Image (cartoon, rainbow, N blue to C red):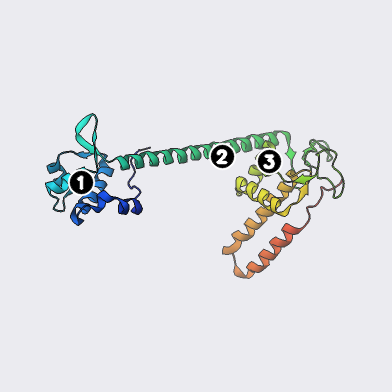
Amino acid sequence: MTDKSPAYQWYPKDILSSLRVAALTDLEELWYRRALDYSWLHVTLPADPETLARIIGRGCTVEGAKAVLTFYTPVKKDSTKVFNDRQQKERQKQKKNRLQKSGAGKASAEKRKKIKELADKEALRLASTAVEIPLNGNPTLQSSSSSSSSEIDSSNEESKEGEAPTRHGKIRTIPERWQPDERLLAWAVTTYPNLNILDQVQDFVRHYLGAGTEKANWSPVFQTWLKRSEKFRLQDGNKNADPESLRSHTEVLAERKRIMSAPIAPPPTK
């Protein structure tokens, strides 16, 4: 990553309120601005007025170069060169911003990597144990010698409407920092590879916080949310299909509203 940036911030208020800049003639201000461009690209400029005048160009005189040099500071270890203090501060600010964005990008990449690893791990585990996770029920283990299935995890059971929960604790609204556990997250990424699961989590929490819905267990509700999101995605993806086979946008929105407002079905009883 290079520390050099092709552009620097220009602050009109600072330049117009500067008494030193106001004291320059029109030509001297032109030469000063050209010198700023050169010093941004090369960091330093020659301290010799004659040499600087030739670099600035546009008919810059030695006296004009001397006026420009009043805005520059000599380099401590090399008196033949000068630099602009304000530009140095701008370089440091831009470098800090780049490092912050780079750090955020690396953190996001690590998070995506972890999700993929969890998804791969869960896919292998499901394949080896033949675990099936229904959208509105409990994970079940399929037996090869019998058509019956036994429960392996009842953590995703939903409390019946109006019935006090006995396994999941108190019925409450969704926590602001709610996140699916690692197993549910890996299942979601594996089952719905075309959905951005992280975005879905944020939308899910935002929706139910606004609705004020109370549940004892939010995991099965999130499973149903993903099922609906996938349905919406497929509907939106049909825009390039035969127009005669598509419903109108109004019909799609109405269907989406109907689905989102419908109560979540309880797990099927056996």
Residue picked out by circle 2: 112
| In front of the other: 120 or 168 | 168
Query: x, y (%) of residue 37?
Result: 26, 47
Q: Earlier in the sequence, mark 3 or mark 1?
A: 1
Residue 246 can be seen in this image: no
Tell which residue pokes out farthest to the bottom in this image: 244
| In front of the other: 23 or 165 | 23
Query: x, y (%) of residue 243?
Result: 60, 69
Looking at the rendered structure, the secondary structure element under dot 2 is helix
Q: CA distance from mark 3 to mark 1?
A: 61 Å
Task: Answer with left or right where residue 161 lies relative to residue 28.
Answer: right
Q: Earlier in the sequence, mark 3 or mark 2?
A: 2
Callout 3–callout 2 Cβ contact below 8 Å: no
State which mark lies toward you, 1 or 2. 1
Q: Earlier in the sequence, mark 1 or mark 2?
A: 1
Residue picked out by circle 3: 180
Task: Answer with left or right where residue 62 lies relative to residue 132.
Answer: left
Residue picked out by circle 1: 68
Looking at the rendered structure, the secondary structure element under dot 1 is helix
Q: CA distance from mark 1 to mark 2?
A: 51 Å
Q: Where on the picture, by quarter, is residue 87?
A: top left
Q: Label 3 crowding class (10 Å Cα cut-off): few <14, some 14-19, many 20+?
A: some
Residue drawn where x is 12% and y is 46% of the image: 62
Residue drawn where x is 66% and y is 50% of the image: 206
Task: Answer with left or right where residue 237 lies relative to residue 59.
Answer: right
Residue drawn where x is 63% and y is 38% of the image: 119
Query: x, y (%) of residue 92?
Result: 37, 38
Q: Amino acid at mark 2?
A: Arg
Q: Amino acid at mark 1?
A: Val
Residue drawn where x is 19% and y is 55% of the image: 25
